[in-house]
Image: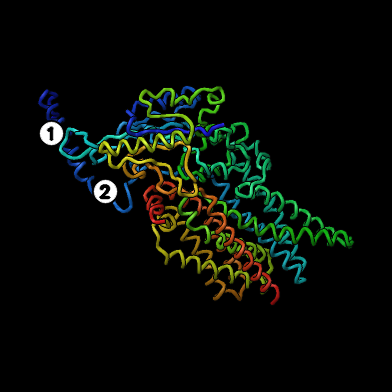
Amino acid sequence: MKTAAKPKMTEERLEEIRKAASESTKETLATQESPRKPSAQGEQSYYGLPALKAPVWTWEVPLYFFLGGIAGLSACVAFVAQSFRSDPALIRVSLWAALLGAAMCPVLLIADLGRPTRFLNMLRVFKLRSAMSLGAWILAAFSGFAFLAVVCFEILLRGFTNPLWTSLLWLGETSAAAVGLLLASYTAVLIGATAIPVWSENRKLLPVHFLTSGLGCSAAILELAGFLIPATQVLGFAASGIETLIEIFLEVRKRPVDAPLHQGKSGTTLRIAGLLEGPIALFLRVFWGSVPAGRYAAAVCFLIGALLSRYAWIWAGRASARDPNVLFQLQRQT
Amino acid sequence: MPISAFLTDASLCIGCKACEVACKEWNEVPDDGFSWSGHSYDNTRALGASTWRHVLFLEQPHRMGAQLAGINEPFRWQFLSDVCKHCANAGCLEACPTGSIVRTEVGSVFVQPDICNGCGYCVVSCPFGVIEKRPEDGRAFKCTFCYDRQKAGLIPACAKACPTESIQFGDLEVLRLRGKKRVQNLQERGYSDARIYDPQETSVGGIHAFSVIFGEPEAYNLPPAPEVPTVYLKSAWTSAFISAAIIVAIVCAAFAI
């Protein structure tokens, strides 16, 4: 084209343009005949534009999902360890992990709000039907119980044995453990009960993943704190084992709605995360688990994988919201 | 008080966008960008935080009744003014953790701007992709059904501005009947694929802003079977409780050995 002379702007040229436009319109209509025809799947979407709004949550929310999982499961581990009269040093680390996690979570959530100064509006109502409302109350309750447990534990550790502190510790630990399980799993329900297809179609899988991931992370933190005992090894094995199964399940099951879990930024990240949490951590434990370095490596791999997977799931939600065709096909099937 | 409703009739819409303009002016909605989309005459693209009425422009290779398009191939150009559906079971309302989103006495779904803290959960809970967070403001916005005007005994700005009565405002049951009759009438006149879009058979339980459309709803980006996301809660929580029980058993086993 660069060598061709510029066509003279005449009435003939205008006729030419008009003719070309009319030809191309006919062509477009003819070629679009087949994809635009009503089929069993129904009509195509409106110019391929998204039919849903993508999640607006920024980096704070996936990080919160990650920390909430660690905090919740750490409280659960502390309670069980206490019940089996395990090493007080281990219980102490778990309780502090729960409290520190609980302290960071509200900061992240408030930072993500469009109007951070209105964060207290979260506690204006209590709605069982809103996972977000329930979550705000769960986090508030968890922080209180974790704080109570840590305070009582530290008092008892300093030799102030008193039935009051013992019973308050018991109350704090049991409640924190119970609410901690909710804290680690409600986030999965939160995204599972939305209009975003890739989330809602995986609503049963997400809680399994989030809880297992939280468990593996709380065990990994104990290992990194130096507790290379059989209990943390067993927890690490169990968590990586379940994550491996989830990874295999996701790879084997091919549904159009799961495309964001296999393709693009979210798919790649989720695959790396799944490998780190599952097969790689498991491999390290099996072949290198007898030496501390192997267990540290497995713990670090699991933590990184767990963090990445939370981001991958949020990104998958964004990709899912952009695809109107999958949404419509899904609704036509059911 | 009777339940208010919109009946938006694609067979009467001329694509003038008076509703978009009227809505913006009355509600002082900020601009939603000045850019060309290339999608027919639609440069608005979709409903959003700053777009509460959206006129769709469909170019389809179908005959429109007995109309002749002036080209050999079957062709029709359709318009429809889309709006928040004010669902009978509204996903955004159920999801809102602050109680900012409420059901008004006229049956509409209203976001109280002085309560909303911009958590963004309503955005992913709307099965129609309507409500959106306005980034520069931080809060979520959508059609108010001109709640202020209705309180003053006036009809919504879009319906008032519509020159062809494509947007009709009135009592829900009256308009449902009118819509049904309109579709019957259109079909008798040869517009065989005229239909009502009002998903009453799904968990959404019907919408208060329904439409007369031609052909499949997907072409208008209207979901054929929208569900209110709270229907997913039961199975998600069941999975969470079973998983939690198994996790506790694993932790107990780990510390028992």
Question: Which of the two marks, 2 or 1, is nearer to us in this view?
Answer: 2
Horizontally, is B3 left or right of A257 in the view? right
The residue at the point 61 percent across, 41 percent down is A111
Assign the C terminus of chain A to one quadrant of the image. bottom left
Instruction: Name the residue beneath numbered marker 1.
Output: A4
Horizontally, is B234 left or right of B127 in the view? right
Point out the tag, 2 or 1, that comes first from the N-terminus.
1
Assign the N terminus of chain A to one quadrant of the image. top left
Q: Relative to the observer, which residue lies in front, B86 or A120?
A: B86
Tell me if I can see residue A304 in this picture. no
Amino acid at the residue labelled 2? Pro
The chain containing the residue under callout 1 comes to A
Q: Please identify the quarter of the rendering in which residue A257 is found.
A: bottom left
Instruction: Name the residue beneath numbered marker 2.
Output: A35
Q: CA distance from mark 2 to mark 1?
A: 37 Å
Residue A302 in picture, x, y percent from top left = 56, 63
Residue A312 in picture, x, y percent from top left = 49, 54
Amino acid at the residue labelled 1? Ala
Answer whether labels 2 and 1 touch (C-beta < 8 Å). Answer: no
SS at mark 2 in the image: helix
The residue at the point 74 percent across, 58 percent down is A175
Q: Relative to the observer, which residue lies in front, B77 or A317?
A: B77
